Image: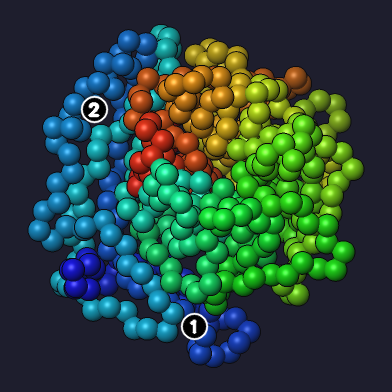
Amino acid sequence: MGPSEELAVLGLSEFNRLSRFLLTSHSSCRHGDNTNSWWLPRSPVSTVTDALRPSVCSGRAAAAAVVAGRRRSEAGGLRWGPGQASGRGVEAVPGKPAPPGRGAPGRRPRSPPLPGPMAGAVGGTGGSGWTWRPVARDPLLARAFHSCTELRGRFYLVGGLLAGGAREPSSDMVVFDPAEGQAVRVGARGGPRRSHHDAAPVGGRWVCVVGGWDGSRRLATVSALDTERGVWEAWTAAPGSCSPAGLSSHTCTRLSDRELRVAGREGGTRTQRRYGSIYTLRLDPGARTYCYKEEGYHTVSRSGHCAALLRSPGPHPGHQLLLFGGCNSAEAEVAGHWSHGKIKEEPPAAPRLTEQLASLVSSGQGSQQGPRGLRHHSCSVVGPFAVLFGGETLTRARDTICNDLYIYDTRKSPSLWFHFPCADHGLKRVGHRTCLWNDQLYLVGGFGEDGRTASPQVCILDLFI
């Protein structure tokens, strides 16, 4: 297949927004020239749909809706007509002109329809429910055990496994623009080959990838993408850094713009003891260095867990870092506590979604039950709530991949769990990520029910109260 067949280029307006953003960011940096500039070409539009209004299901109606929706999907499928987007992304290569387009500039062919909305449901008569609504679809996004970092309104997807059973992780990076619903592979050189890693934004400019599996060993190093120059940098350990053993399936939580809290990791009995160490990781973008410091307390040994920095309930305000899952325990574990004013980091404002979550947990639809033995699930902080979804359960030998929604409510002491099950097996996910942006919670990637097929969809959590 030649290059002209491989690329499906639409009108000039399709990716201008992201292109202008990156070019403007570079031209305003200190270098003062364009010799090291990079660009993202105009991309074919991903399969995007306008706002779909999923029906709200409850009780037996949920199962019926799921079956009917699956039959419709199997009967219809996706239709790719002449002039429609292929769903492929275009690889961006530094220093080369954009490929020529095919078709009239500025015209946007109609995108093929997405499958019908996924039905997540809760029982009862109150009419409350939830669903993941598909908003974009692109094969570039199909991966699991990757990182997904929001920075200046873009999602940076790094590495991961492209299929179940893959021996080596991917080294590519994909940028997804949620406002436009478009994805593009970025050809930044020197990208790390990683899976089961974590990443965090630093300085409003860098995406720092911490640890992970490179196909042969676990690492504790830091690689940083400079989003202004479009290059990867291998940062070095500062003198006195107390680096942990190799990290994978760990968590990195921002405490400030230059400080992360690292918890948990995979390993055998020699490297993963009964108790796990906690590390503070300090980052210095100016010197391109990092420094690990081991804290004086430990947690239960865990991997594939999630972490949430939340305000402390009760009479003594402050913040606490909670770990969920990654072991057989159903209890949240405190991996750090800070008094009032010590933590400046706050989750993005999401007033509408916060209000909807408060209404959902007050509706009486969910059971007050937390996840037990869950790993490789997702977690996002929305106001006083931690929202967990999917993952793999350690409590069953078969049918281990989950599609349940859990909400941890910290508004009162003691904090409460709420469990909202789902009837749609098509929603099962493991190794996925969720990102909060613009008052919406996005679901990106992950393996489906078979544990091998990566989802190319991006979905938004819809709540119906």
Q: Looking at the image, is 127 positioned above or below residue 301?
A: above
Residue nearer the viewer, 364 or 83: 83
Q: In this view, does 269 lie to the left or right of 391?
A: right
Query: Which label belongs to residue 70?
Result: 2
Q: What residue type is labelled 2?
A: Arg
Q: Name the residue under label 1.
A: 37
Q: Quadrant for the C terminus, please.
A: top left
Depth order, front residue of 214/422:
214
Residue 157: x and y in percent read 48, 56
Residue at 69% x, 56% y is: 220
Residue 303 quadrant: top right
Task: Tell me the quarter of the image containing the N terminus.
Answer: bottom left
Amino acid type at circle 1 is: Ser
- Name the residue: 73% across, 48% down: 262
- Mark 2, secondary structure of its residue: helix
Asked if one can make out residue 132 in the rendered structure from this viewpoint, the answer is no
Tell me the quarter of the picture where residue 185 sits: bottom left
Name the residue rendered at 41%, 30% in the picture. 428
Where in the figure is residue 84, as x and y percent of width and height?
Answer: 16, 57
Sequence-wise, the earlier of marks 2 and 1 is 1
Nearest the camera: 294 or 103? 294
Q: How many marks?
A: 2
**Disc marking residue 359:** none
